[in-house]
Image: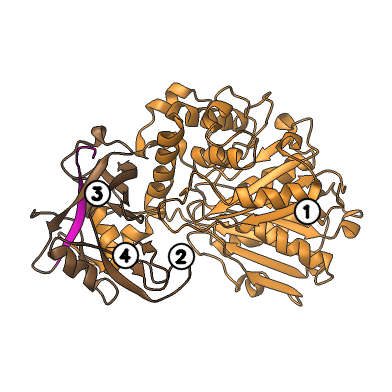
Chain colours: A brown, B orange
Amino acid sequence: MTTTTNRPIPTPDERSAEFFRAAKEGRLLIKRCSNCGRNLAPQREACDACTSEALEWAEASGRGVVYSFVVMHQVLHPSFKDEVPYNVALVELDEGPRIISNLVGVANSDIRVGARVEAVFEDLSEEVAVPKFRTVAAD
Amino acid sequence: MAQAKAAIVGLGITEMGKVFGRSGTSLAIEAINLALEDAGLKKDDLDGLLINAGISNSIGLGLQNAGGFKGLRLLNHMNAAGSTACQMVQYASMAVQNGMANYVACVFADTPLAAPGASSGAAYGGAARAAAASGNGRPAGPPGWAGLNAHYGYFGVNIGYAMAARRHMAEFGTTSEQFGAIAVAERDWAVMNDRAQMRTPITIEDHQASRFIVEPLHLLDCCLVSNGAVAVIVTSVERAADAKASPAYVLAMAQGHPGDSRSAGDPHEVSTGAVIARETLYGQLGITAKDIDICELYDCYTYTVLVTLEDYGFCAKGEGGAFVEDGKLGPGGSLPTNTGGGELSAFYMWGMTPMSEGVIQARGGGGQRQVAKNDLVLVTGNGGILDYHASIILSPRPA
């Protein structure tokens, strides 16, 4: 999917470049502990189970559930002045980690905790795409 | 029952709320002076100073020289977010117990309201400010993960608490009206507090009709943003016996920091560090929740009160909504809670809001709102988004 968003466009840095590169290819990356195998959120730099810093990137299925969500009414950033109210969701991936994202293609009033979701990727520029989630039928 | 660990013998509270044109340092010095006066002490008696700045970061170690505090034997600038107030009193208690200092001032000051008319949301939307600073129109986001959150519109602390509240609602059937019952109870207390900024009684209907800040949180679920300062003076149990005013004794103290991996299996803020702290806190006195007379709970949001009550065992996990909806937290109720109006209706001085009211109630100085039975007053603080937690129990008696 492509966008005409007015929202801030992330700038990949050393720690996130691989994540954004994969997102551009339609793949959702998480981290996996090379020591104990635990799946971790992509931002983690150490394993919360064994504290190992030997983490590798792993591809997630992109599927999960809405663990929680909010509908934001405040305009704390000028890019969002025409977007309120907008949703922010905490998605629990099937692999375990929970990540912040937005739900697309669903009215805010129809969002439910526990709903099944899958990742879709929104192109923001030539270089950057970001994962968002759409609701899907329960398995 | 265990002996008290220390005592609070002085309390200073400045003017609160839309206080403009004064620095955090100025407010902090005034709060300390008021606390010294309350305690019947002179500045030279003070040999310890613990400092906690709020979101505006308007005080720091420079307070020592700005206030002319000389020859201190204890000094630190502490930050464990909203749990700091309880932590300062804990560290001060340990210091006076161990002979490191005689009288320790613990002070909090904040000036987040920059100018008349400035929005309080802006004061706490730091991430948004940082993002907005990077451009206009179609701004570039900050680098890396922060930019991802900015793209998703994840700004400020309101969203994190709303996320926790929503999860609690989904998991346990908690309702917005039940959050409203907390707001109503606190407002009913605020009516009797001259220092409270909001003193007009409200109803559940008012709560429901107030605008959404971040669903599921309404305006009346959220604390006030305030300028001001609060200080307390901590001393040893022995010295407290000679105090000018009646002391509030520190009977028990605890912390709890659960950690959150943001991964399946973690309760993610439907359970807090209070679960850890309560074992330590109650264990020191051999008591249970049933023995607590008054609660002064950190209430940056109505939800925080509800989850804290659960985690201190006043009701089972998930039953907080039903527990609070009968009005038991308000004046005349069976569990007087946030008896000054709390952060929701009185003023928001982080953990110093519940601390100051706990001291007032334990010393019997609550006037019209004084609760008759005040043997055990639970004071809690939480910081981060329910990440850090500290608590103490205050009492009019040293044992």
Which region of the structure is painted magenta?
A128-139
Assign a secondary structure to mark 3.
loop
What subunit carries mark 3? A
Q: Earlier in the sequence, mark 4 or mark 3?
A: 4
CA gap, disc 1 and disc 2: 39 Å
The residue drawn where x is 86% and y is 46% is B1
Depth check: B65 or B383 in front? Answer: B383
Label at residue A48: 2
Q: Could you classify mark 3 by the number of other residues whose Cα lies within 10 Å: few (under 14), some (14-19), or many (20 or more)?
A: many
Label at residue A42: 4
* Labels 1 and 2 in the same subunit: no
Q: Could you classify mark 1 by the number of other residues whose Cα lies within 10 Å: few (under 14), some (14-19), or many (20 or more)?
A: many
Depth check: A116 or B211 in front? Answer: A116
CA gap, disc 4 and disc 2: 13 Å
CA gap, disc 2 and disc 3: 25 Å
Label 3 sits on residue? A102
Q: Amino acid at mark 3?
A: Asn
Label at residue B8: 1
